[in-house]
Image: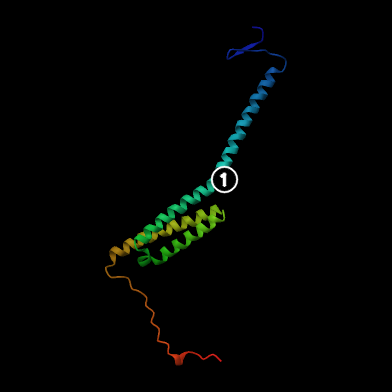
Amino acid sequence: MDGNQTAEGLTLFRTHGTDRRVARAACLTAVAKCAFALAAFGFSLCACGPVTATTVIDDAEVALLRAHAAEGEKYALYETTLADLYLQKAKEEQGHARYADARELADNALRQAQIATRKAAERRTSDTTPAPRATIQHEPVTPADKPVKP
């Protein structure tokens, strides 16, 4: 052989430094591919925050609907109210692009809604009497009791 190589039907002529130039070009190609992969990964991470926050918020909304359907306001008032408030705050944080906070709040809302659903189901099956209702009675106000404005 005369020092030339054949690659895929092409004859490559070897000159002084050809091997180094081919190796350098291959190395630069590998670096470019690696940089592209890292950039794509970085962009996917940026999109991850909104997607995961939205997913957890949607899950919390569904769980809260279940809690309301199980009469959570009647049998698990604290947990249902807490889940409502957590969900409302999660949506607010999502609106301000604070996706990590929104996801954490939505996780809390989801957890509280699940607890409310479970408690409501347990209390509804074990309790045959209706839950007591708070009634506040006020004494009637007569015109003589009202203060007179000077």
At x 42%, y 66%, the residue is: 78
Mark 1 residue crowding within 10 angstroms, few (<14) / some (14–19) / many (20+): few
How far from the left and from the top, in percent, is residue 103?
50, 53
Q: Position of residue 58 (x, y in %)?
A: 44, 52
Indicate the amino acid at tag 1: Cys
In the drawing, does residue 114 fall left or right of residue 86?
left
What is the residue that sits farthest to the right in this orientation? 16
Q: Is 101 located above or below residue 23 in the figure?
A: below
Task: Name the residue located 53 percent from the left edge and 46 percent from the top edge.
Answer: 48
Q: Is residue 74 above or below residue 139?
A: above
Residue 139 point in image, percent of width and height? 40, 86
Placement of 27 over or under 106, stated as above or below: above
Residue 131's image quarter?
bottom left
Q: Give coordinates of residue 106: x percent, y percent.
A: 48, 56
Q: Residue at x 39, y 59 (%)?
A: 115
The quadrant holding residue 65 is bottom left
Q: Check the image and tell me how it is coloured.
A: rainbow
Q: Is residue 53 left or right of residue 129?
A: right
The kind of secondary structure element at disc 1 is: helix
For the point 35% across and 60% down, the residue is 69
Circle 1 residue: 46
Q: Quadrant of the C terminus?
A: bottom right
